[in-house]
Image (cartoon, rainbow, N blue to C red):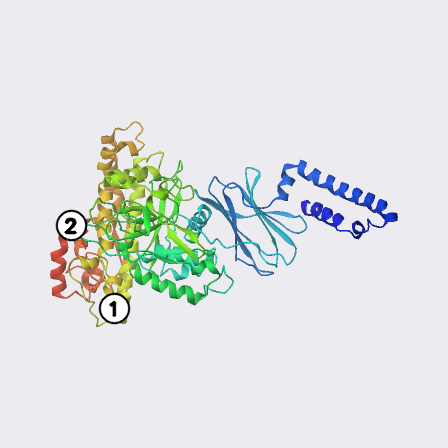
Amino acid sequence: MAIIALKCLQSSLTKPYIRTFSDSKSSGIAASELCLSVTLCFFLLAGLIASPALAQELVCGQHNGTQLWISPLNPKAGEAIKIMAVSTDGPLAELAAIDNQGQRTVLQSRRRGGPPWSLVAELAESAEGLQRIEAYRDGKLAACHERAAGGINAQQRLKEWNLAAEAFYSVWIETLFGAPPAENLSFTSLQPVLRNAERNFLHNYLGLNEDNNLPLTPDCADLPYTLRAYFAWKTGLPVAFRACGRGSAKAPPRCGAPTIVSEFTRGISSQSSFTKFSRRLVDTVHSGSARTGLADESTDLYPIPMNRETLWPGTVYADPYGHILVLAEWVPQTADSPGMLLAVDAQPDNSVTRKRVWEGTMLFANTANAGPGFKAFRPLIQTAPGQWRVFSNDELSGHTEFTAYSLEQDQLTPDDFYAKLSKLINPEGFDPLQAYEATLAALVEQIETRITSINNGEAYFRKNPRSVIPMPGGAAIFQTIGPWEDYSTPSRDMRLLIAINVLTGLPEKILRHPELFVLGNQSPAQAKAQIEQHHAQRILESSIRYTRSDGSAWELSVADVLARKPAFEMAYNPNDCAELRWGAKPNTEEYATCRRHAPAEQRAKMEQYRAWFRETRRPVQ
């Protein structure tokens, strides 16, 4: 309706008779006709403005912290489009599409977050005519996007990091790894994730079929950098990274000057250009890049406050030993189920897995040689055309567009850190039985992920039956290159041992931190006794199945796994058969199918390093 009114006014003011006023005979008639025409248009517009809902049609843009994004960037006629509404100031209610006939259709959308909050929908593209996308909150227009279907899209690429860009990145990550919380989400690498058009909102965003055969297989440390760079490539943003050392026993890693890449801001870059850049990126960054000191200025990532408003999907968690997680989704606590924080990580074999965040997956320690904790990528600002610099810690301390720099995590003990994290995930407190079941489920999830890792090693030896993988010495067993990095599991087994300690230590945690639990009429001591009894029963009822050397399945109860805890102190060597790596004892039926053993000199090394695992104390590298 607003479009009709505006066209009416435009038509009235451009009629031929308004250019004939010099003709004295026709000037009076023309003037009166013009006056009548403009008056009618005026009343039409006035009627629209009198109606708030219709008046909103006159101005189409982004409002009140809400942005609309369309994918692909420039859709072709007849092509389906994906729509993402992203808000930083509250949930959104619905997405609607209006065609050139004024027909309004409420779109079926997927709601996520927040913060940030989002709605994602898909729309079959109409062949012609004006089309309008609207996002609503509480019955009011929050944002809209107007475009000519089949024509040139007015949507612009981002070109600079700001609050809208960070929120878009966050929701893109959340959507990329979205799935029901109970689903075991795992991929052989990042490639199938990005090539999945349903998951990846930015799939073929540039319209160049640029995701076809895109080679991206980042490992642990490369994953957050690769995700950030991919997003920047698609949306036209600069990226920065540094070459860093690995630190020492007494000091965290230090980094050099940033390499700032602004190529993506100057126009659409090809797949080959991005591939070349991504290879340079992963050849430079490593686990030390994220473990930098919390007060350091020369870093790619900086520490942020530890609260629900700042820990958005896309936030990086760097543990003190080099493992890195990327937050993917918050699952709210309800009356019937506990909350969850989900994250993704990549392994040395390039597999990418989503997992729940808990003490068994997110390690925290106060160490002199690392700056662990939740961190955000340091944003860039343009200082002149084509020139950029990164923000300093002081600039980020009070900036309105970016998450604040904070040393809060530096003041926390591990016990305090986990207590605060638990309170963020379950702000209403945990029923002790709920807490136990969630912890048990997380442990089983971690064991099942280990099954995949060991299976990958077995697949390697089926292809290379006479091979013996060299074993590095000392702390290098946790970080090296080649088949040992791909198929050994020292870091994973260290986390498994910690996870076992967390489950068995839950009763004592109830005594130490009763404020985290909803105890009702129970005392902490009564709740502790209840959980100990429940634990004894549940570990017999829960089980996993691993694949033995001959391809047969063998079942272990969680009680079996817990009883084999000492065996997991020396179970990370891929040269050993699967049976040994799951703690099977010689001269048993389970062990009978074992056909491969690590060399004696490697077993001697493992015995020498066993104390690290028994004490769950990773050595300084």
**The disc labelled 1 sits on which kind of residue?**
Phe
Furthest residue in direction right, as rendered: 25
Q: Is residue 590 visible?
A: no
**Visible residue check, residue 601:** yes
Given the image, on which type of amino acid does mark 2 rest? Arg
Q: Is residue 45 above or below residue 236?
A: above
Q: Is residue 413 left or right of residue 310?
A: left
Instruction: Give the residue drawn at x 41%, y 63%.
Output: 274
CA neighbours of label 1 inside 10 A, class few (<14), some (14 to 19), many (20+): some
Q: CA distance from mark 1 to mark 2?
A: 28 Å
x and y, in percent, of residue 512 in the image: 23, 34
What quarter of the picture does the N terminus occupy?
top right
The residue beneath circle 1 is 461
The circle drawn on residue 614 is: 2
Residue plotted at (85% across, 45% down)? 29
- Establish if 169 lies above or below 137: below
- Asked where in the image residue 312 lies, by quadrant, the reply is top left
Q: Residue 85's x, y, as percent?
A: 51, 47
Give neighbour class at mark 2: few <14, some 14-19, many 20+ (Cα, 10 Å): some
| Residue drawn 85% across the image and 50% down it | 23
What kind of element bears circle 1?
helix
Label 2: state its secondary structure: helix
Q: Which mark is first along the chain, 2 or 1?
A: 1
Residue at x-position 25% and y-position 66%: 482
The residue nearer to you, when weighing 553 against 385, is 385
Residue 5 lies left or right of residue 505; in this view the side is: right
Q: Is residue 250 left or right of residue 111?
A: left
Along the viewing direction, whichever of 599 and 401 lies nearer the viewer: 401
